[in-house]
Amino acid sequence: MNYADIAIWIAAGLLLLAGLLGSARPLLPRTTLMLLGVLLQKWLLPAALGWDAVSWIVAAVILGILVGTVARSACAAVILGFLVGTVARSACAAVILGIHLLAVLATAPTPPRGVSRIT
């Protein structure tokens, strides 16, 4: 792994973290930043993520946007609609992070049997 790969991992991780922090700060776009981090990682490090994980993450982003929008517009009480939309989009952000972590761990190289990772 060279310095460019490390920089890409850091950039993608920071975008994922910023999207997750958007759950607490309403002005940050939650799932959009997370999607940008995933797409950046897939574009620059194609072996790190599979297309199936990217498609599930895109589906979670679309679902989060739809549920958040419907919840905000369907509730008569503005505060209740805002809270329901925020919880729904935060849950989708957690799902995106979980899918990303599982996909990265599934594609991580494993050492041969009998060889320790720590040398």
Image (tube, helix red, strand yellow):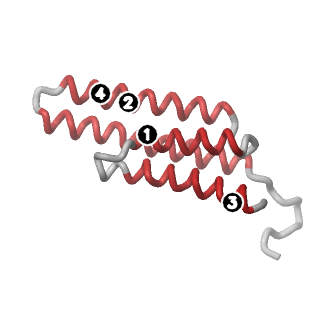
> What amino acid type is highlighted by mark number 4?
Thr
Q: Earlier in the sequence, mark 3 or mark 4?
A: 3
Q: Earlier in the sequence, mark 1 or mark 3?
A: 3
The span from disc 3 to disc 4 (Cα, nearest Å) is 36 Å
Q: Who's the residue at 33% across and 37% down the image?
A: 88
Looking at the rendered structure, the secondary structure element under dot 1 is helix
Closer to us: mark 3 or mark 4? 3
Q: Position of residue 102 (x, y in %)?
A: 62, 46
> What amino acid type is highlighted by mark number 2?
Ile
Quarter of the N terminus within the rendering? bottom right
For the view shown, which residue lies furthest in the bottom direction? 119
Residue on which disc 4 sits: 69
The residue carrying pointer 3 sits among few (fewer than 14), some (14 to 19) or many (20 or more) residues within 10 Å by Cα, namely few
Q: Who's the residue at 43% across and 43% down the image?
A: 93
Q: Earlier in the sequence, mark 1 or mark 2?
A: 1
Name the one closer to the observer, 67 or 14.
14
Q: Who's the residue at 43% across and 39% down the image?
A: 31
The span from disc 1 to disc 2 (Cα, nearest Å) is 8 Å
Closer to us: mark 2 or mark 3? 3
> What amino acid type is highlighted by mark number 3?
Ile
Q: Do callouts 4 and 1 mark residues in contact (Cβ within 8 Å)?
A: no
Residue on which disc 3 sits: 6
Looking at the rendered structure, the secondary structure element under dot 3 is helix
Looking at the image, is 59 positioned above or below residue 112? above
Left or right, 63 with respect to 43, comes to: left
Looking at the rendered structure, the secondary structure element under dot 2 is helix
Q: Which mark is residue 31?
A: 1
> What amino acid type is highlighted by mark number 1?
Thr
Looking at the image, is 32 positioned above or below residue 104? above
Q: Do callouts 1 and 2 mark residues in contact (Cβ within 8 Å)?
A: yes
Residue on which disc 2 sits: 65
